[in-house]
Image (cartoon, rainbow, N blue to C red):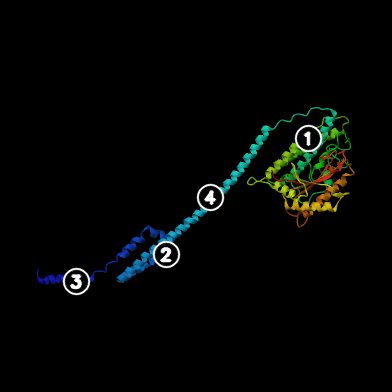
Amino acid sequence: MSARRLAGIAVAGVLLGACAPIPRPAVLDELDHVRAGAAAAESRRYAPGAFARAEKLRGDALAALESEDRSGAQILGEQAIAAHAHAHALSRAARAEAAATEAKAQRSAGEASLAGLEAEQSRVAAEVDALDMRTKVARDAQPVVPSGKADTDREKARLAAARSLALQARLLCGAARLLITPAPPGSAQPAGASSASAQPPGASSTAQPAGAGSASAQPPGASSTAQPPGAGSASAQPAGTSAQPSDASAGSAQPGSAELAAQLEGATAAIKKLDAELAEAGRSARVLPAPIDQASRARAGCLAALTAARRAATPVTRAPGAGDALLTELSAAGTWSPVRDDRGIVVTLRGLFSGNALTKAGEARLRDLALVATAHPSFPVAVVVHTDRDISAKEEASWAARADAVVRALGPAQGAAGAGAPGSPSIAPFLAGSAAPVVDPGGRERARNARVEIIFVTPETL
């Protein structure tokens, strides 16, 4: 080959090399690899701002390369890679925060579900305990054996016991009525009015011996010819309530109370039938078999109605304990000597009256009890007036006035607006007569039988 041709080839190679494009920096290829990876996709989702900044630097690097600024493209490409690394770090932090938030939400949902399961477990456990108790009671219960005939003296004693059981039945049914169909606060009528309104059909209120049930409380052998049949049922009905629950009362009570009202109506009907038998035994010139078995069943029926009313109002997710708290509070005062019976917490007061009016000391003690009633508005209050002797029809109005005076004394402290204020407890007077003496009615201390019982009816099971 000639020298001239070699020189031409060399010149052509120089010219071709001068026209070749500037090679692409390797950092840009690395940048494209980073941008296409999973880290960049995660950055685009959790750190869009940082990802956009890295993309801007990449665009600037490409623009510098197009303007043949190789050094600028190299620098901007490295900055874009660093920006992508920063965006990835931010995305990891954001992802961790999102995972923590989701974990907290799942924990809250789990705790709520656990609380619901615990509440359901408590409810089921309470139902199981109640069923176990009912099963045990049913298994251990013994059938009532008829009392059979007895001699004259024993029949008289049975008659007195039957009258006492009848009074207890009426008081228990009255307590159940306060829980099932409570009267509006401040609506309690005088006790005398309740005696008349609670008589069964056909009974004359003017011929009834005073004390509402005093006829059924007569000692053995006492004459009760002045008492109309069934008048004894008026003795322990709460003021303003009838012997049988009305449809309106049953419909206005809490859910499920229709069955409770029906149960109470059945127990009340048993009391009315018992009163008729007691009245017949009292009128008879000869000693008739005392209805002691019927009296026991009537009391049991009223106690069952009261227990059912309490069970319906007892929460299953916490221990009731309201009666225990009230008993503890009254006991701690040191002046009331409270006791507990089937009706609730009982405070017995004596010497409240001077004639038919309350004494100043009696009013003060009742005001103190009114404050207790205000602090425990869920406890209906029953005012039971006992006499120390059988009283005549003429005296009934005066004893009813005493019961009314006690109700009025307890009423004003029920709220800032006086009796009938919202949230105040229901108060109902009862005239018990002399059917439940605490000492010998013929002894020297028979005056102790005249007393007033303030009963805070326990609204829940023990």
Residue 282 percent across, percent down from the top left: 86, 34
- Residue highlighted by disc 1: 295
- Residue highlighted by disc 3: 14
Label 4: state its secondary structure. helix
Labels 4 and 3 touching (C-beta < 8 A): no
- Residue highlighted by disc 2: 50
Residue 66 visible in rendering: no
Q: How far apart are marks 4 and 1 (CA)?
A: 56 Å
The one of 263 and 214 positioned closer to us in this rendering: 214
Residue 414 percent across, percent down from the top left: 76, 54
Q: In this view, does 47 lie above or below 339?
A: below
- Say which amino acid is labelled 1: Ala
Badge 3 local density, few (<14 within 10 Å), some, or many (20+)?
A: few
Labels 1 and 3 touching (C-beta < 8 A): no
- Say which amino acid is labelled 2: Ala
Q: Is residue 312 left or right of residue 152?
A: left
- Say which amino acid is labelled 3: Val
Labels 3 and 2 touching (C-beta < 8 A): no
Labels 2 and 4 touching (C-beta < 8 A): no
Q: Which of the two labelled residues, at mark 3 and mark 2, occupies the earlier sequence position?
A: 3
- Residue highlighted by disc 4: 110
Labels 4 and 1 touching (C-beta < 8 A): no
Q: Identify which residue is drawn at 14% across, 71% down.
A: 8
Q: In this view, does 155 lie to the left or right of 264?
A: right
